[in-house]
Amino acid sequence: MANRIAPPFDETVSKFCKDTGRNLTEVTNLITAFAAQYGEYGKNLNTMAWLWVQNQGMAPLPLKQSSTPFSTIDKPYLTLNQVLSKESGIGENTGFAIRGWVFGRREGKSSTGGPALYLTLADGTDAYDVNIYGKQVETVTALGINLFDAVYIKNAQMHRMNQNGEPLTTPRIQVSGQYAETKKITTGEFDLPALKDIPASPLDSLKPYQTALVKGLVFETNQREYSGCPNCMSKFKEKVAYGASSDCPGNPAKQRASCGRVTATRMAWTDIHINDQSGELKLSFGPSFDFNEEQLKALRFRPIVSIGYLDPESNSLQSRYMNTEEQFNKMASAVPTASVIPAPNPAPVSTVSTATPVVITPTPIVTTPTTATLPAPTVTTSNPIPPGAIASSLPPNGAVAPLVENWVRLMGPKTEAEMIKFMNEKKHIPVQAVKNTVKEMIEMGILVTDDTGKMRLA
C-alpha cells in the first residue's frame, strides 16, 4: 500500500518559476511566509510549496507515491490521547490498535462514493471519530455494533491528507484495507474503563473541532424554526406554510438532490445552554432531534450528558447524542463487565514508520452531526439503526432501549405486545431483543405498568 506525498520543494519551485518566469528567490520567500502562518504544521516545506502553487491557481506537480511498507506498532492498544498527541510520531501506513465505547454511529458515503461508517469512540482519555471504509463497513455492520457497545480495532491507521492530496485540518483515524480487524469487547478487556467511568471534558477546555463528552446543567433553551422537506430536512428557499405541498429544494452545496413533491413540515434547530464548574457552552441539535416545547421545558435545570464536536464558527458543540445524566448513569451501570483483563497497561508510543511526515493545515473538514431519533427529556436520543445492524444478541441497554423509550414518550402507554409489534415490523429488531429490553427497563425502573396493564415511562 503506497502513500501519496508532495514532491521535493526544489522541484515544485523550479517548475513554477519556469512556467511563470517568476524569480526563484522571490517565490521561495513567498512560500516561506505562507508556511509561517501555520506554525509547527508549516515546517514541511515540501507540502507547503505544493499547496502554495495550487493557491496561485496553477496545477502543481503530481503527488508522488511513497513506497513505505505497511508496519505496525507492537502494543496491545494505544489510548486515543496517545494516538492524537503531537508526540505520538505515528506515520501514515502504520497500524495501531485502539478500543473505546461507541457514542455515535452514522452511515454515509466516502469521497469516492463507496460505503462509509463513522463511529465516535470514547475511551476515558479522549473522544474521536473513526472512519470506516470499504469491506470493513460490511464487517462492522455484521457485528451489530451500535451505541454504547465497546469495540476493539486492530490496525487502524492515521491519515493526514484527503484523496486530493490536501492536508486535513485534523488527523483522521481510518479503518480500511486487508489488515484491519474489529470486534466487540466488554468492560475490563484491554483495560477499557467502565462506561459510567468515562470522564466529561471541562467546558472551557474544548478546542476547535475537538470531539468531546460533556456534562452540565441546562439553564436556557431556544429554537430556530423553519419550513422544510420531511425527507432530507432541506429548508425551502421561500416561506412555505406547514402542511402545504411544494417541491423539495434539495441542497446543492451538499450535493443533495430534490426529493420531488413533498409536504412542508415544521423543522427546528435547537440550542441547549449548559454550564459546569469551568464555564458555559451552547449545544446545538439538528432538526432530526425535533424537541417540542414541553420536552425543552422539562430539561431546564436538569443535568445532561452530550457528545459532539466544537464548531469554532458558532462556538457551539454540534451534538450527536444527548441524555439526562440520571438516565445515562442508569444505563451505564447496567453494562456487563469482563471477568478478566488480558492486556497490560500500554507503554509510551514508539515510532516505527519512516513515512515522510505530512503537514496539517487549518482547512476545516469535519463530520456531519449524526441524525437522531426524537428525544424525550429523560431519555436518550440516538442514531437511527439500519435493519442489518442489529443482532439478536444486542444488549438491552444498547440501541434498543432508547428507541423504546422515545416511542413510549411520543405515543403514550403501550402494551408489551404493541411494543414488540412496532419495534419488530418498523425497526426490524428481533422479537426476543425487544422482550429482553422491556424486561430490563422494568427492572431498572425506567418503565412501569399502569392500572390498564399498559407500560409507561416512570
Image (cartoon, grey):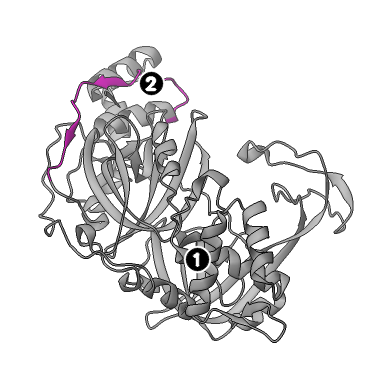
Residue 60 magenta-drawn? Answer: yes
Give the mark nearer the N terminus: 2 vs 1.
2
Which quarter of the figure is the C terminus placed in? bottom right
Residue sitting nearer the eye, 434 or 319: 434
Residue sitting nearer the eye, 123 or 173: 123
Instruction: From the viewer's perspective, tell me whether residue 127 is left or right of residue 55.
Output: left
Residue 167: percent from left, percent from top: 36, 37
Instruction: From the viewer's perspective, tell me whether residue 239 is left or right of residue 385.
Output: right
Q: At numbered mark 1, what does the secondary structure look like: helix, strand or loop?
A: helix
Residue 120 magenta-drawn? Answer: no
Kind of residue indicated by mark 2: Pro
Instruction: From the viewer's perspective, tell me whether residue 135 is left or right of residue 317.
Output: left
Disc 1 residue crowd, few under 14, some 14–19, many 20+, Cα 10 Å:
some
Residue 269: percent from left, percent from top: 65, 63
In the image, which is nearer the foreground, mark 2 or mark 1? Answer: 1
Q: At numbered mark 2, what does the secondary structure look like: helix, strand or loop?
A: loop
Residue sitting nearer the eye, 98 or 215: 98
For the point 68% across and 77% down, which residue is it? 454
The span shown in magenta is 55-74
Residue 297: percent from left, percent from top: 65, 82
Residue 264: percent from left, percent from top: 82, 53
Which quarter of the figure is the N terminus placed in? top left
For the point 10% across and 55% down, which residue is it? 347
Gap in angstroms between the C-alphas marked 2 and 1: 60 Å
Quadrant for residue 142, please give it. top left
Residue 60 disc label:
2
Q: Which residue is denoted by mark 1 in the rendering?
A: 436
